[in-house]
Amino acid sequence: MAPAWRTPLLALAAAWITLIAATAPSWDEMLHQWWNSDTYNHLLLVPFIIGWLVMLKAGELARITPQPFLPGLALVAAALAVWWAGRAADINLIAHAGAVGAVQAAVLTVLGLRASLLLALPLAMGAFLVPFGDEIIPPLQFITADITVALTRWSGVPANIDGIYINTPAGLFIVAEACSGVKFLIAMVTLGVLVAFTRFASWRRRAAFFVACIIIPILANGVRAWATVYVAQYVGAEAATGFDHIVYGWIFFAVIAAALLAGAWRFFEREPEDYGWRADDLTAWGWLTRAEGFSIAPTVPALVIAAMAAIAALAAML
């Protein structure tokens, strides 16, 4: 660790500890969902992905001196306010977003603008620590049902649809929440952001790959559901459903993800270690020097963050 980074990193660690302690109920809820919900199991990998991205920037970070950015305190305060509002309204998504946002804002505040710009991607990936996606389950169920019934009819099997209910000669099938494909879609979106910004340089290719990471999982889930209905016409609904649950674990996700990456491989424009800005790029930005303002010890914003975290925790208990 470079001497110039020792105190800022210790100050950041202290700020993180106080923020996580203050918002501990939300972090406990998120960890529970990461560990126990099939939809969010992949989020257990996100901290390691963030760590890997930071390590790739270690050389560039060593070339700068972290300098606290005091306006970032406003973002920390705003994030804590969002967390408090979420807790008060009993809306976990808002509370979780506030808890994660406070930790992200602390990086900007304690380490400064230059370090945060170099770490823009890992900081952005932190947003995926928030379990989200339940809100899109109903529309995904209807989309999956529509794809399934269309393919079922195309394959010569008569089928009627009523919302998420599909009636066939083999029986009535329901596109349940677990069959909506939401966990597959969320995981692919996470992968899409990671690959788009580490392997592509042009925004057009990034956008194309990201859109593919949304469309392909939805279509693939519809095909999977159709295969279940089609196979059920010959082996029975119970046997087909059992096979579907075995196949449509992470095996199915891995096959589709591998196929998507294989198709995009020839279009990759750079190696992962080349992602983002370089320290030399930031040197040419005159506005950045002006925005950084005066120098201050990193312990100062860390102490202010600790005080704000304590106030937020007390407010949540009232």
Image (tube, grey):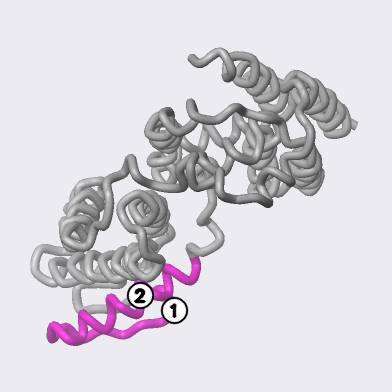
Task: Identify the element where label 1 is drawn.
Answer: loop
Residue drawn at (22%, 62%) of the image: 267
Q: Nearer the viewer, mark 2 or mark 1?
A: 2
Q: Position of residue 238 (x, y in %)?
A: 21, 57
Q: Nearer the viewer, residue 91 or 176?
A: 91
Task: Identify the element where label 2 is drawn.
Answer: helix
**Is residue 163 on the magenta stretch?**
yes
Q: Is residue 157 left or right of residue 92?
A: left
Q: Is residue 239 above or below residue 214?
A: above
Res 163 label: 1
Instruction: State how far apart marks 2 and 1 are (Cα).
Output: 7 Å
In the image, which residues are magenta? 138-164
**Is residue 51 on the magenta stretch?**
no
Q: What type of secondary structure mainly makes up the magenta span? A: helix
Res 32 label: none
Q: Amino acid at mark 1?
A: Gly
Q: Is residue 274 left or right of residue 58?
A: left
Quadrant housing the C terminus: top right
Q: Position of residue 94 (x, y in %)?
A: 69, 49
Residue drawn at (56%, 43%) of the image: 283
- For marks 2 and 1, the one nearer the N-term is 2
10 Å crowding of disc 1: few (<14), some (14-19), many (20+): few
Q: Is residue 168 above or below residue 185?
A: below
Labelled pair 2, 1 in contact (Cβ < 8 Å):
yes
Residue drawn at (83%, 32%) of the image: 312
Residue marked by disc 2: 145
